[in-house]
Amino acid sequence: MWKAFGPNADKIIGSEDSKLSRSDLRAKTGNTIAVRDVSFDVTPGEVFVVMGLSGSGKSTLVRCMTRLIEPTSGNLFFGDEDILKADIKRLRELRKTKFSMVFQHFGLLPHRKVIDNIAYSLEINGIKKDKRYARANEVIELVGLQGYAHAYPEQLSGGMQQRVGLARALAVDPEIMFLDEPFSALDPLIRRDMQAEVIRLHHELGKTMVFITHDLAEAVKVGDRIAIMRDGALVQIGTPEELVANPADEYVADFVRDVAKSHVLTLRYLARPPKSGEVLDGPELSADTIIRDACALIVDQMRPVRVTDNGKALGIVTSEDVLRLISGTV
């Protein structure tokens, strides 16, 4: 997928000019490429995070995925259906029933109570009043808004308002949720609580989510996989563990430098062959165990911990291995 802004933007795609840097392209043609030949798949039930610095193209990308912004070129498939070929009627149907969006700015209707804001997404779908309010009450319970159904948005904190936004998005039971930096305007403690809320909702509901953020710590916390963008292009896609363990270039390495490796990497990363004389009768842990969660057991051992993957021995880990990782020498 490509998205270019400017005069005759469609003629830029595939031309020699498309290879120019952003500044050179703008100087030569007056155009800007916001999304540059981006391709990826999101699997059902996955939380797929797109992250990058301001201006990297991540918010433009998610708006192209919902056709709030029309892509300049490419394909966008929802199952076997190319969304870019959908007419306005079909597009409205998809937005009403299959897709939901949660934005940084909550967009709540100030003159409507919480329950009315949540029920609004069902109202525009033509759902009868008793059914839409029954569903609104269900999602009020789901997102922890009990007791606030008849409050107005101005009476709520920022975190509570964003819970209303989440509830409104969930009310239609969408197949995909698009969250565009939904917590970046919140205070750090409230933001942490909302991140935990998204994780909980995902575990309970199994919704497919495309989550946009500029915060790597947030991306690592909520994402199954992370795509890092720079100047409109994808730099690397991988699990948090893959990005931290094997950054594709210095740009990604700079992003992950401050991430505590022991909070992301699993024992699979540290497992090594035993050295001569090391005893192999220690306790056994799964290779998928986060190193942080295994630290206490490993450090307390006077012997190596065996690391296995579905019963197959991968190697061992000792307290010295963990301490080298934490100290940054691994």
Image: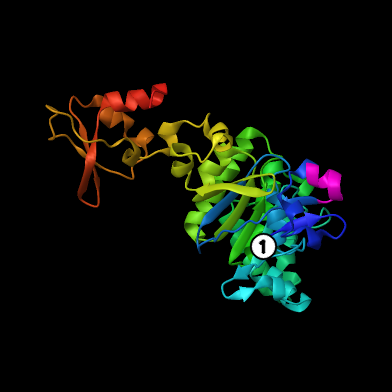
Which quarter shows the C terminus?
Answer: top left
The quadrant in which residue 23 appears is top right
Q: Quick check: can you spot residue 168?
A: no
Position of 283 with respect to 247 (left or right) is left
Image quadrant where residue 116 sits: bottom right
Q: Position of residue 121 (x, y in %)?
A: 72, 66
At label 1, which amino acid type do we have? Ser
Dominant SS in magenta: helix
Residue named by callout 1: 100
Is residue 75 highlighted in magenta?
A: no
Instruction: Name above or below for residue 309 compared with residue 88.
Output: above
Query: Badge 1: few (under 14), some or many (20 or more) residues near its Cα, within 10 Å?
Result: many
Q: Secondary structure at mark 1?
A: strand
Q: Answer whether residue 30 is magenta in the image.
A: yes
**Image height check: is 4 above or below 191?**
below
Considering only vertical position in the picture, is 111 above or below 104? below
Q: Which residues are magenta?
A: 24-31
Q: Nearer the viewer, residue 75 or 113?
A: 75
Q: Quick one: 9 or 271, which is closer to the camera?
A: 9
How many numbered markers are drawn?
Answer: 1
